Amino acid sequence: MKRSDTGSNHVNTDDSGRTSNDRGHPAPVDIILAGRHAAGCDMNRGPLSEDQLRIGEEDYEEFLCVGISDETYGINILQIKEIIKPRQVTEIPRTPSSVSGVISLRGMIIPVLNTPEQLGLKPPPATSEARVVVVKTSTGCTGLLVNKVFKVVRVSRSCVESAPAVVRGIDRTFVSGIGRADNCMLILLNVERVAEIPPW
């Protein structure tokens, strides 16, 4: 049994690779991967690169890589409740255009946002790979529609930089920082801001 620390949370890993916290509950990454499986996403996390293995010995956070428009963004897995396939939404009259509508998720009514429009990006063509990432915020849960779900990566906290003044065409308030994973830049989303319902 191996054990690693992430902030104040302890995560244990058994010989089969399953992870859990000190109370025996599944670790957040396993919940996300289970949601990916239920949504028909690829379950393979793939082998860790040398950079990822080194980060494993450091203070790091894990992010789910998602495609929005033609860019890849990172969502902190601790803020993700689950991943589901897009479903029929109930439209709400006179709401902002970025609000697709609401859905019922196990008895809980949550809004679903058209994330590209929320970020002011060009909407991508609809594909079977689109998913709704249900995120948790201080005001409740919100569904973020994304083009595709890729994989979970580790990002060392020491390598996260502040968002520059211009971040590839989106408002910098939507970005919590810029990280690096596998030698690639990853735009880390400010989930609280992205999931905020615009006033109407």
Image (cartoon, grey):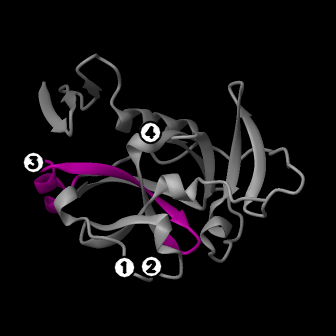
- Vertical placement of residue 176 versus 170, above or below: above
- Most extreme residue toward the front is 199
**Which residue has dot 4 on it?**
32
The crowd level at tag 4 (other Cα within 10 Å; few <14, some 14-19, many 20+) is many
Q: Nearer the viewer, residue 71 or 192?
A: 192
Q: Which residues are magenta?
A: 48-71
What is the distance, in whole Å, between disc 4 and disc 2 at their CAs?
27 Å
55 in magenta: yes
Residue 108's x, y, as percent? 69, 29
Q: Amino acid at mark 4?
A: Ile
Of helix, strand and loop, which one carries label 1?
loop
47 in magenta: no
Of helix, strand and loop, which one carries label 2?
loop
Q: Nearer the viewer, residue 180 or 188?
A: 188
Of helix, strand and loop, which one carries label 3?
loop
- Residue at 67% across, 54% down: 197
Q: Are marks 2 and 1 in contact (CB under 8 Å)?
A: yes
Q: Amino acid at mark 2?
A: Val
**Which residue has dot 3 on it?**
57
The numbered mark, 3 or 2, whose residue comes first in the sequence reads 3
**Which residue has dot 1 on it?**
164
What is the distance, in whole Å, between disc 3 and disc 2 at their CAs?
30 Å
- Residue at 43% across, 39% down: 33
Left or right of 76, for residue 40: right
What is the distance, in whole Å, between disc 2 and disc 1 at their CAs?
6 Å
**Which residue has dot 2 on it?**
167
What is the distance, in whole Å, between disc 1 and disc 3 at their CAs?
28 Å
Left or right of 110, for residue 78: left
Q: Does residue 170 show up?
A: yes
The crowd level at tag 2 (other Cα within 10 Å; few <14, some 14-19, many 20+) is some
Of helix, strand and loop, which one carries label 4?
helix
